[in-house]
Image: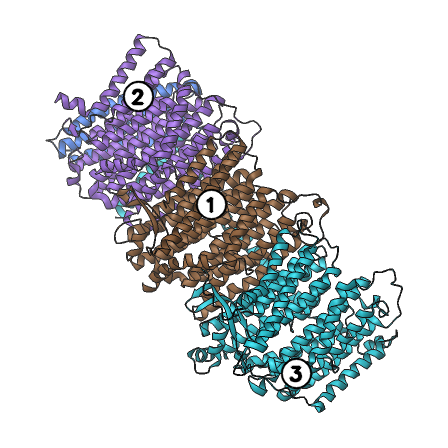
Amino acid sequence: MLGVFSFGIDLGWALLMIPLLPLLGFLVLGLFGRKQIKQSSGIFATSLVLVSAFLSFHTAYGYFFKYGKLEGVYQKIIPIQFTWLQFSPGVSIDMGILLDPISVMMLVVVTLISLMVHIYSLAYLKGEERFPTYYSFLGLFTFSMLGLVVASNIFQMYIFWELVGVSSFLLIGYYYDRPSAVAACKKAFIVTRFADLGFLIGILILSFYAGTLDFNTLILKLTTTSTPEFLSATAASFMGISALTWALVLVFIGGAGKSALFPLHVWLPDAMEGPTPVSALIHAATMVVAGVFLVARLFPVFSMSAPALELVAFVGIISALFAALIACTQTDIKRVLAYSTMSQIGFMMFALGVSGSGGENGLGFTAAMFHLFTHALFKALLFLGAGAVIHFIHSNEMKDMGGLRKYLPITHITFLIACLAISGVPPFAGFFSKEEILLAAYQHNATIYWIALITSGLTAFYMFRLYFSIFWNKESLAHESAHGEGGFAMMLPLVLLSVGAAAAGFIPFGDFVSSDGKPLESVFHWQFSIAPIALGLAGIFTAMWLYKKQNNRSDTIAHSLSGLYKLAFHKFYVDELYLFITKKIIFNLVGRPAAWFDKNVVNGLVNATGNSTLFISEKIKGFQSGKVQQYAIYFLAGVIGLAILFIYVWK
Amino acid sequence: MMEPGLYHVLIISTALFFIGVFGFLTRRNLITMLMSIELVLNSVNINFIAFNKYAWPNKLDGLFFSIFVIAIAAAEAAVAIAIIINLYRSHQSIDVENAADLKF
Amino acid sequence: MNLTLLILLPLLTAVAILLMRNDAQVKWTALMGASAQFVLAFCLLFAFRKERALGNIAQMLFEFHYQWFPSWHISFHLGVDGISVAMILLTAFVVIAGVLVSWNVTKMTKEFYFLLILLSLGAYGFFMSLDLFVLFFFLEIAVIPKYLLIGIWGSGKKEYAANKLALMLMGGSALVLVGLLGVYFGAPNHNFDLMLLSSMHIPIAIQKICFPLLFVGFGVFTALFPFHTWVPDGHSSAPTAGSMFLAGISMKLGGYGCLRVATYILPDGAKEYANLVIVLSTIAILYGAFATMMQKDLKYINAYSSVSHCGFVLLGIGMLTKTAMVGAVMQMVSHGLMTALFFAVIGMIYERTHTRQVNEMGGLIKVMPFITTVLFIVGLCSLGLPGLSGFVAEMTIFMGSWQNADLFHRVATIAACMSIVVTAVYILRAIGQTAMGPIKEGHLSVGDARWNEKLAAIILIAGIVAIGIAPYWLNELVTPAADIIMHKIATK
Amino acid sequence: MLNDFLLLMKSELVLAFILFLLLIIKVAAEVKNERLLALIQILLLGNFIYGFFFIQNGSLFGGMYTTNGLIAFQKSILSLGIYLISLLFSDWLKKSEHLIEFFILLLSAVMGMFFLISSESLLMFYLSLELATIPVAAMANFDLHKKISSEASMKMILSSALSSGVLLFGISLIYGATGTLNFSAIPALLDGTGVQILAFIFLFTAFAFKLSIVPFHLWTADVYEGSPIAVTSFLSVISKGSIAFILLTTLYKVFAPMHGLWYNMVMLLSIITMIVGNLFALRQQNIKRFLAFSSIAQVGFILVGISSNSILGTASVVYFVLVYVFSNLAAFGVAGVISQHSGKERIEDYRGLYQTNPFISWVLALALFSLAGIPPTAGFFGKLFLITAGAFKGNYFFITVAALNMIISLYYYLRVIRAVFMDSNEQPIGKINLDISTKLGMIICGAGIVLLGLLSWVYDYITALSI
């Protein structure tokens, strides 16, 4: 039975179409793509996403400007919901669509970037054997991500959370015959799965105390300090920490895994084995910010637990700095971008961590969401640009690049815009969102603020290191023979996104997205901006000094910082640590003994039972000696034995 | 001179029984083993007669029984001897130890 | 709807198979019989839903009663509730798929199909029995065909495996027998009727003796740690359809028995031993998963993962909450479909590559896109991907388990949850090594699935997806039945 | 009086009639074996059918002989058994030089068993027991030129003579203690003194010997292996069955006052018998020897049923014997056919049998499954009822041991199944053309194995008779 359909607004079906259209693409291409519609699969999928994107924009327009507000506050609207799986009274997985500022914003971001990537891939992956499969996976991912962002129920979110994980797995492993891609996709899935374990247990705890899985009810119950649910959740404690905090920390672990925060970030750089447009979509703009989105979605509950928020903030800032340091040393351009993504997500996360709930306190929240939005644009742009470069040069390594500005003019310009945006140079988008984050951090916690400041400088440095290494540096080698920039399909998304990256900062974001639904005044302090901008510029110029022309200054510096450089270059040996834990400890100390135990002890016992029976059987064969007189002896012994036993012993 | 009573007779019959059993267990010759069985049966006969005489003089069951036992023993011996003869034909021996091929 | 149809139909099919003259006739007869079962199972589902929709709230529907051995109070009593209907559906799915994938069996075809159909007969009868004697009868009917299937058509150490399986399962059923007799003589009046027994109050002392006997006995069938060692050997040696039946149906007999017999009629015993059950099943879940990680043979991988997955069934039962119990039933159905599909795929791969060692394969996507797609689907189902059945079942069990608020249950639940990570590890390892990576030289020319294999896979996938996408129908089917069982436990 | 005599003793009289007929034929005419065998088969079938008519209750000879519905049914089971033997071993019988003598001895033994079942006095019991034993010892020697046959026969006659001696000693003690030999009079006079216990144990060992209860079983395997298969099957089925029936009467009726004693004894011996029988059966190579030990283990199960001391126990034991007749005779029948055609008696020779002889393989499989107690064969019901009856006392230990022994027994039955169905053989037993009556016998056995359990009225009928 299809539960309760409640069409709050007429747009219900249109809204439903937003995620379902990509799903349709997935199904059609998955079932028939290989043979029947191989040629037109790209166009087909792209047009579906186009419609989906249009509907998202339409929805966003409608929500933000027409029906979303009630008495000046953006409402949480659930136009569609039905019970999918009932566990017990009140606790059920409901599939539904929840419209509120952040989900509407995410709808726009996801469909937009997805559309860009769809278009871009038309050219990027032209002629690939598994072209339809690629598009069907993209469809699956888009569907799942849309389902995730509109989830009205925490379990629904978990469901789509898993689904995006698997789409990511499938897309990373798209080049299935490369061992490194296979390893990467497995790693991505398993690391995020490990984090999801935390998410799952967090859900279990939350649902137990709140008695519901529905976001709205859950938030309501766990944020009102007088409800019995809240009281029991805070009163119950394990190891001195309240159940609520445990739940939130566990949920945050899930988010951290998906968002590649320290120390669960190891999968993200490897995930760059996937096709570059996929990295743009999944591993830069959308899926990896799911963790941020999750914390934002549950933010009211997080704000009830100071320790949990504290953890969010610290993990965020550590990740930001950590990733930025590594990014400075990497030579694979996609890896640099990957670490940069991690670093930026760290920014968003600590912004949430330092935020309070409601009014001015909620600046961090708005800032995080804002940064999420702008980051999606410029990071997608960066990846797509990098994709164009890779497409052109067939290599990911910086050393193979240089002087490409002549060959790839459009890419060059758009890449530059994106670099400026991420480095926080005004008036590009990143500047505004980063300013807000720094402001929020400044208001809350000085340590975090200073680290964030340094990190933003580092950001500028490594981005421009990248930029100069690709487009300037050594005037390289003739690439004339190669094809051009990839044609219209690849350039269109770059241009569109660069417009976004340049201009998105002027959106009055606080009017739309805030922690409590009320518009938040964005206060712009120009004095405050001096330090970040100066640091950013310093970073840029350092990079320029080191990398614009071919020289060995960078090597010299690397030598002089040998210890730190080596650490960062080897990503602080986190991978090795994990390898040690999994291979040496889990495999050797758990898996192998378990298998051994099973084979020898458990199975051995069973076999021993059988063998000992046969053994006894062999041993007692002597009774049947074939001598009739011995038989008579046993006979009489039996008589006498029975007589003694029953007359004297067992009376 | 004491009149022999039931117990005396029973002791004799029991002794006879065990002598028979002992003979059965120790003799190699099949005929001798058969004869030992006859001893066992005779000890039973003595038992029956004795019980009849001393314990239940009014009931003749014991007497009849012993007659039947004698008859049956004869029949059994006849069949047994036939079998032993046949065994001798095939084994060229009536030593019980030689007829122990079937075992385990 | 007359339930005896579900027994008569396989019986007639089996007889018809024996009468056929050549292999083609045998196959088509078997397929027709299996399809008829399939249709019949769906008819049962719809009839059941219709009755319920009409407001028939009797615990068991379509009861059939025939005095069999009046002197022992044994009656041929059949009836179904939601749990039985779910299990019958599962059986129908696995049977038709099993018949389809065995299409190219050439050795003693007639006997092969005869045994397959006989096995299905046992399973149907078992799931419908409301009389413990009849239930036991059908339980044992289902054992010997497995032995022969493995022993005759199997591979590898088949004789050892067949022996081990038959003996361990018979050992299990021997314990069941003793337990049943204990119940029979311990109950206030001697009876084998499940419904009557469930309404009686069986003395607690008897329950304490009989529950472990019954639970362990049935547990052997469903790979209760440490009685699971027949699973890896049995599954790996069995022919494809044999493994499918073994893991898809046979292991479910045990789970169903634990639920319907042990837990339902001995609620006090269940309460008494619930913690032990939880400990053992948690061990099975984790231990099975870790042991799977070290396996290299695809069939061993699935076999050990079955140990792990079936641990969830027992965990769900041991948790003694309604939700967990519903989850346990869902897990039985889900795992039945999934593991049958998994074995089917393994069979298909083996037939083409002639190896089951994962490290001897690679990049099979290239040459067998359909089969590897199925492998992906089933692997993902196994690791609990939403949208496929495994997720629904496991999550229901987790939710149900979490309803017990004490630390012990919490720890067990969390430990069980951890298996989702380990499962991901071994499944991805297996898939990664077989389907992905560079292709091996010798496998370049192998072909993709044939029509029968495709059909079998599609049928099973349909079942998996139907539960995964729309679990509410299964939930609705099972919940009232679980409610009754839980109610009994709660009130006793 | 004469009328009573004719009616009450009708089974024995019919047997006597057949016996005389055969004697006359032997003396008077030269008849070909084929035709003679056909005649005998028809006569035995008639005997079996006749057994269901004119059943009356009553006793004769001053209470030494009794009969009733249950006893008549038990006799019918035995009649059925010999009829099946005449069918199943027709190949062997046709070639036998001494066909008539074989049947004369066989029928004499059966007559002894009929009297045994009907006996109401220790005297009658002893006489009929000897009548049931001595001819069989002669039959065991029927392969006159085989060394092992004479050895088997010698072992049997000597052992049984010793056991008779012990039995007689026990009877004499009972007589001494109670002064009566009559079954109906004894119970009231039993008071459980040491002499009586000793007498009971002596008496019981005779049963134990005939039923092959451990440790009185040692002759069994040797005799079974050495004898012709037809005789072996007779020994293991008909002979065992009749003793089981009279054991029921003896324990339930005569020694009812000593129930506590014999329950423990039966339980103890049952456990030992099952275990030892199974352990020995595990390692046998010769199919006859294998079946010998399996039948020992089966006897252990019969004891489980007997221990219940109830109507259900009686019914279960009778039913089990009926099932056992079909199952074991089918197994022996197959072994006999194979031995007759190829001279092979080892289990490993059976490898690949299914490839050449599917029909007899299925019969063998059914028989073995029935012996192992696998549904839907009748053996399942038989064993289950025995165990259920045995569980009446709530002795879980006993029942668990019995149930676990079923697993061991399954192992060795499966060993044969494995050889027949799974293993391959370079020199399999060739295609065997079955004699029509052998085939008929196997079909009857197979049908009996499949239907006896599923059609519950057979068991109900027995239960009704047992009350």
Q: Do labels 3 and 2 share a chain?
A: no
* Chain painted in purple in the figure: D
Residue for badge 3: A437
Mark 2 falls on what kind of element? helix
Tag 1, which chain?
C
Label 1, residues with CA under 10 Å away: few <14, some 14-19, many ≥20 = many
Q: What is the display colour for chain C?
A: brown
Mark 3 falls on what kind of element? helix
Q: Distance between the residues labelled 1 and 2?
A: 50 Å
Front one among C140 and C400 = C400
- Where residue D16 is drawn, which disc sits there? none
Tag 3, which chain?
A
Tag 2, which chain?
D
Front one among D374 and D241 = D374
Question: Is residue A592 at least partly visible in the picture?
Answer: yes
Q: In this view, does D171 lie to the left or right of A235?
A: left
Badge 1 vs badge 2, beta-carbon distance below 8 Å: no
Mark 1 falls on what kind of element? helix
* Chain painted in blue in the figure: B
Tell me where residue C291 appears, x and y as whole percent: 57, 56
Name the quarter where the N terminus of chain A is drawn.
Answer: bottom left
Residue for badge 1: C38
Residue for badge 2: D44
Badge 3 vs badge 2, beta-carbon distance below 8 Å: no
Q: In this view, does A187 lie to the left or right of C81?
A: right
Residue type at numbered disc 2:
Leu
Q: Quadrant of residue A469?
A: bottom right
Residue at image location 55% in from the left, 40% down from the top: C102
Q: Quadrant of residue A112?
A: bottom right
